[in-house]
């Protein structure tokens, strides 16, 4: 057993108990009798922090003291006011970008050590922190050519904190997997490994610079979201420099009251930006909470913080698109079939029964305003269905699922009646038409024909290189080869013209 992780876990539990943030007293009216009794017992050990503020405020203070992994959890919770309540979510919202900064003098030392140059030679003007998060903080600065930039610097010692948090997370997930049988299908250990790996990548800002550059190219292909340009001479393992992100921070409540802001279009754009990235390009910004988003009036989003970039393979993209399309068109049989084809539901289950269960989930929510839907009840129903059909957590989809939850939460904060399905429809239909429509079939047919022609060419080369006399194929077979080549060529040019 990792004793350091064990004692850190005990410290986490004790801090939550002392702050009355584990089973808050405010929840007593809604808790089962046994849990309510346990909560009252734990409150015997509560300290002064238990009397200071609302449940969300107490939890935010506790999470802030635990470190980066816990803060990331708080950021996700803060996007779901529809599940946890508006007040609770707002109390956690300062975890996004308003944590206490470390001294600017330390940031200057980190920059000079990492880039091998004085701060003044890189940034004639270098200001105080403008935002501080769990992993790093950002400073306002200017280059010699007059461009305004944001300089991101990792917190000193953050690598050690993340490593310690990771060991605790692995211990907790191991205990859950061992002693809570119903949770095993969620594969907590694999889930934790995925989270820890993403955080490790986030600690090398050279990877984030590459992610920002790649995502900037991807975002430029659609009008929904933009990314600032990377200033490569200001990039190192612990330092990242980007051109200044235009717009007002979405994490500031005052931004939502700006004259001319189109909140409804903005809610649509955050959903469409994410889906167009994931479906069309197989790469997406996997940390799209309000602290990483800025708004340019009336409805353009500018994203920062590309430390976590998610990726989807061709098959995962197809499954995602077809599942979303099935829900949009209320084709539950199609959705069920895709789940079985993808292996998300074990083959021994009844596909028809699963389609019926999906209908029970989809019909009450499709076409209704978000404010009329209880997300807590919907999630509970989904959890019951996944248990009933032995659906396990897919580690390769963890970042996708986490980002979808965050994106939907941001959209609903912008527009309480936001229709996720209506926002997703044009992106999903575009993908379906391009990848599964007649043009796509013609393109696939042409590709198959070209592969056949290449195979014939290789066969001809092999034949000409040998001295063995080979009986020529029958004329009928040659005719069919010729016909196939002509059809393949025609399909290829049809696909070019139509595509």
Image (cartoon, grey):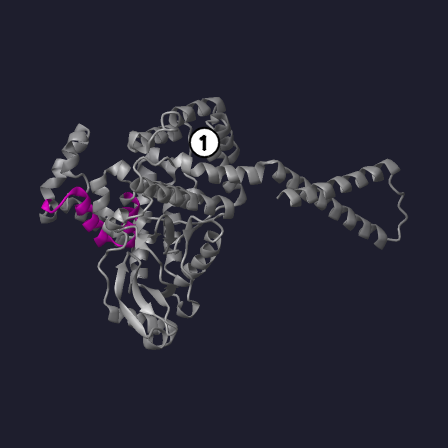
**Foreground of the two, 392 or 244:** 244
Find disc 1 in the rendering and name its residue: 328
146 left or right, relative to 85: right
Q: Residue 118: horizontal and vertical position, in percent? A: 34, 77
Q: Residue 306: horizontal and vertical position, in percent? A: 39, 55
The reply to whether residue 395 is in sight is no
| Circle 1 crowding by C-alpha within 10 Å: few under 14, some 14–19, many from 20 | many
Q: Residue 205: horizontal and vertical position, in percent? A: 39, 62
The reply to whether residue 301 is in sight is yes
91 left or right, relative to 308: left
**Foreground of the two, 56 or 142:** 142
Q: Which of the 4 quarters of the picture holds residue 124?
A: bottom left
Residue at 69% in and 44% down: 493
**Foreground of the two, 98 or 187:** 98
Question: Height in image: 108 above or below 206?
Answer: below
314 left or right, relative to 296: right
Residue at 50% in and 37% down: 429
Pick out the residue farthest to the front: 260
Asked whether residue 421 is drawn in magenta, I would say no
Quarter of the image with the C terminus is top right
Q: Residue 263: horizontal and vertical position, in percent? A: 32, 43
Name the magenta segment's main secondary structure.
helix
| Magenta residues, start to end | 51-77
Residue at 19% in and 44% down: 56
């Amino acid at each position: 057993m990792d004793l350091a992780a064990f004692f850190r876990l005990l410290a986490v539990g004790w801090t939550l108990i002392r702050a009355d943030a584990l089973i808050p007293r405010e929840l007593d009216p809604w808790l089962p009798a046994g849990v309510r009794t346990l909560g009252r017992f734990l409150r015997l050990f509560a300290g002064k922090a238990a009397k200071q503020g609302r449940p969300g405020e107490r939890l935010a203070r506790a999470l802030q003291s635990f470190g980066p992994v816990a803060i990331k959890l708080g950021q996700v919770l803060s996007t779901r006011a529809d599940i946890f309540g508006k007040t609770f979510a707002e109390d956690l919202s300062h975890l996004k970008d308003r944590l206490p900064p470390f001294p600017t003098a330390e940031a200057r030392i980190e920059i000079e050590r990492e880039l091998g140059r004085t701060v003044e030679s890189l940034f004639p003007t270098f200001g105080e922190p403008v935002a501080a998060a769990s992993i790093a903080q950002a400073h306002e600065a200017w280059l010699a050519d007059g461009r305004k930039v944001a300089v991101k610097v990792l917190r000193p010692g953050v690598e050690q904190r993340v490593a310690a948090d990771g060991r605790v997370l692995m211990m907790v997930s191991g205990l859950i997997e061992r002693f809570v049988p119903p949770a095993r299908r969620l594969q907590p250990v694999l889930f934790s490994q995925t989270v820890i790996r993403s955080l490790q990548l986030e600690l090398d800002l050279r990877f984030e610079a590459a992610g920002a550059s790649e995502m900037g190219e991807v975002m430029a292909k659609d009008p929904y979201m933009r990314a600032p340009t990377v200033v490569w001479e200001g990039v190192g393992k612990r330092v990242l420099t980007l051109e200044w992100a235009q717009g007002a921070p979405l994490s500031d409540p005052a931004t939502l009251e700006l004259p001319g802001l189109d909140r409804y279009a903005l809610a649509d754009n955050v959903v469409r930006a994410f889906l167009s990235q994931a479906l069309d390009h197989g790469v997406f910004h996997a940390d799209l909470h309000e602290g990483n988003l800025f708004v340019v009036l009336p409805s353009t989003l500018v994203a920062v913080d590309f430390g976590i970039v998610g990726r989807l393979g061709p098959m995962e993209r197809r499954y995602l698109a077809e599942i979303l399309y099935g829900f949009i068109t209320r084709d539950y049989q199609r959705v069920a079939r895709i789940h079985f084809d993808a292996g998300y539901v074990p083959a021994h289950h009844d596909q028809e029964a699963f389609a019926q269960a999906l209908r029970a989930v989809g019909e009450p929510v499709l076409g209704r305003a978000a404010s009329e839907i209880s997300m807590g009840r919907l999630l509970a129903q989904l959890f019951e269905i996944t248990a009933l059909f032995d659906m396990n957590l897919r580690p390769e989809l963890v970042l996708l699922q986490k980002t979808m939850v965050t994106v939907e939460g941001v959209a609903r904060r912008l527009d309480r009646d936001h229709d996720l399905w209506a926002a997703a429809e044009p992106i999903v239909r575009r993908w379906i038409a391009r990848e599964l429509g007649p043009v796509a079939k013609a393109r696939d047919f042409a590709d198959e024909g070209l592969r056949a022609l290449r195979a014939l060419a290789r066969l001809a080369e092999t034949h000409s290189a040998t001295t063995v006399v080979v009986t020529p194929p029958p004329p009928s077979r040659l005719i069919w080869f010729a016909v196939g080549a002509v059809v393949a060529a025609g399909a290829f040019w049809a696909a070019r013209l139509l595509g």
